[in-house]
Amino acid sequence: MYKRSKTEPLSLQSVCLPSRDHLYNRMTFYDDIYPFYPQQRSSFIFSGHLLTVILVFLGVATTFLLILPGIRGKSRLFWTFRVIISLFIGVVIVALNYTSDWAEARVNTTSSYKSFSSSVVSAEIGLHVGLYGVNVTLKGTPVVQLNETIDYNEMFSWEDSIEKDFEEALERGLPNPILYLAEKFTTTNPCGLIYQYRYSGRYASATLWTAFCCWVLANILLCLPVILYAGYMMLATSAFIFFSVASFSTIMNVPACIFSVGVASFQTHYSHSFWLALATGTLCLVVGGVLVLFDLVVPEKVRAAFSVAVDDLEDDLQYGEGYLNSVFLNSDHLPCKVMTSVHIPVSS
């Protein structure tokens, strides 16, 4: 064990700092190969949550398709159209919570590959923003460069803390472009993107789940059936979808933070999920408005279309003329059986 003499001056290197050669030996092994990825990983393919949502709704749709042969007449086509539209609205509302393309940006550039290396790669860099985090992609052009397959797809979630995901990315030694974009969404970054994106995503997700509850209530009211109030609930569904779109659109109100990777720079813009949410809200608005309008103008035809003619048929039934037994009416004790006499007219 090394002991410092009383006359020897105190230095940081002699106390706590290892030598540069020691650091280099810890960071590298096997002929100066950096321990970032000993074996290549397969890139992210599909979100597990999104796949679960799609499979559940496909199961429900298959069940309804099996029921359709039991529906007779022209109403079969109407029920098919009604089920498809309703399930489409439901699956879109739930799936939008788990997509990662509400806003995105892509750029082709040349950039340094990894830390402690002067290697430069040509790649397509993508930034995809969802309601619960950001997804950063890096794909080489061509894919195989530096004897390595460059195809990364990394998710950084701010549902709990994005700093934890960023620290794990540093420990794993992800490429520099991915680390640069992920660092922009940490709480210590001067851009402050995390605060606006995280709160906008939370409010948008909350209003989407509220829209899903309104959609469920609308379907229940259509089955009861209460057509007018079902139309009101579809209008409420569209309103909450529009609220989610408006909530997410507030990210464009923050000061622009330009992402610069290599020699290229880019900014995010609205993407597929944003426009899909806007289109679905418009569809709910049209469906709800049509239900309310038709129920107020032609309620009989709307009830007939939704198979609500049962009550009307019961009201139109005419019963024959009948009389109660006078003995039964004058008796003090209620008999066990009710006897009725029916007057049947006899033609002369």
Image: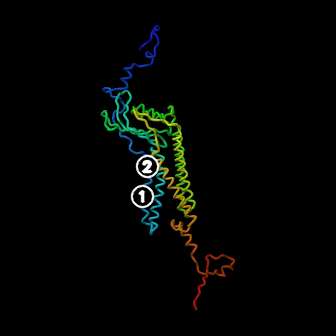
2 or 1: tag closer to the N-terminus: 2
Vertical relation: 32 (above or below) 288: above
Kindly indicate the quadrant of the structure image that contains residue 231: bottom right
Vertical relation: 9 (above or below) 109: above
Q: Tell me the quadrant of the picture where the N terminus can be found.
A: top left
Q: Which residue is mark 1?
A: 62
Q: Residue at x 55, y 56 (%)?
A: 235
Task: Identify the amino acid type marked 2.
Answer: Thr
Tell me how far mark 2 sits from mark 1, CA to CA.
Answer: 15 Å
- Please tell me which residue lies in front, 271 or 236: 271
Q: Residue at x 59, y 86 (%)?
A: 345
- Please tell me which residue lies in front, 29 or 232: 232
Is residue 74 shown left or right of residue 335?
A: left
Count residues near mark 2 (Cα–Cα under 10 Å), then give few for <14, some for 14-19, many for 20+. Answer: few
Q: Residue at x 47, y 44 (%)?
A: 270
Q: Which residue is mark 2?
A: 52
Q: Tell me the quadrant of the picture where the C terminus can be found.
A: bottom right
